[in-house]
Image (spheres, grey):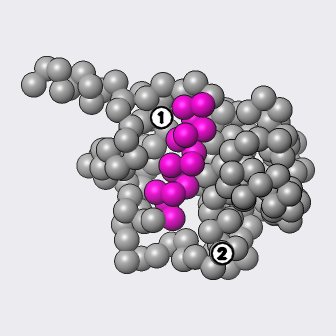
Amino acid sequence: MERFEVNRKETHGEFPLSEIFRGLEDAEVIQSIFGGRDAATKALNSARVRLDDSAEYMYVDDTDGTIVVSGKYLQSASESLLYLDIIHELVHVRQYREGRELFDSKFSYVDRPTELEAYRVTLDEARRIGMTEKEIEDYLYVEWISKKEHKKLAETLGVNGLRRRRNRQTT
């Protein structure tokens, strides 16, 4: 995250990834996602970002592998959230390029192998940059899952947030 920068001037349109998210090429996490520096550079150079408010946050379009980002989210989210989210989505870009089914309906969101893999990579990086378990637990919350699913996702990913530790101590 040391060199990571976000171009918040754009709100709509399609761009090379590096025009919106800069400084990713030297990140070890990005190199690990794509299997080395050369492969990461090639992947980053070919990745596209579409700014489109049909997205609530970010996702990978499973028809072409483009990262779709809400222009509103790009403007309002913290740099650290955008950093973690782009890492998560780049795992999905790699999965898409491998021919994997990103939105396999046989699985719920919190059980989907592609999501779990993307979250594991992202959470390792979140810990590396110093996020607490509580902050990571909060990061895992998304509006389209229930509290029960959120708890399951956190437990599956080995997140031990402050709230759960406190609850366990009082029972």
Left or right of 111? Residue 28 is right
Return the mark for residue 98.
2
Q: Quadrant of the image for the N terminus? A: top right
In front: 68, or 113? 113
Tell me, yes or no, if residue 97 can be seen here. yes
Could you tell me which residue is drawn at 67 percent across and 79 percent down? 63
In front: 170, or 144? 170
Question: Identity of the amino acid at label 2?
Answer: Glu
Q: Which residues are magenta?
A: 114-128
Could you tell me which residue is drawn at 42 percent across and 56 percent down? 144
Return the mark for residue 103.
none
Extreme residue in the left direction: 171
- Rate crowding at label 2 as few (under 14), some (14 to 19) or many (20 or more) other CA atoms within 10 Å: few
In front: 53, or 111? 111
Could you tell me which residue is drawn at 62 percent across and 63 percent down? 92
**As drawn, 47 above or below 88:** below
Return the mark for residue 136.
1
- Rate crowding at label 1 as few (under 14), some (14 to 19) or many (20 or more) other CA atoms within 10 Å: some
Left or right of 87? Residue 171 is left
Q: Secondary structure at mark 1?
A: helix
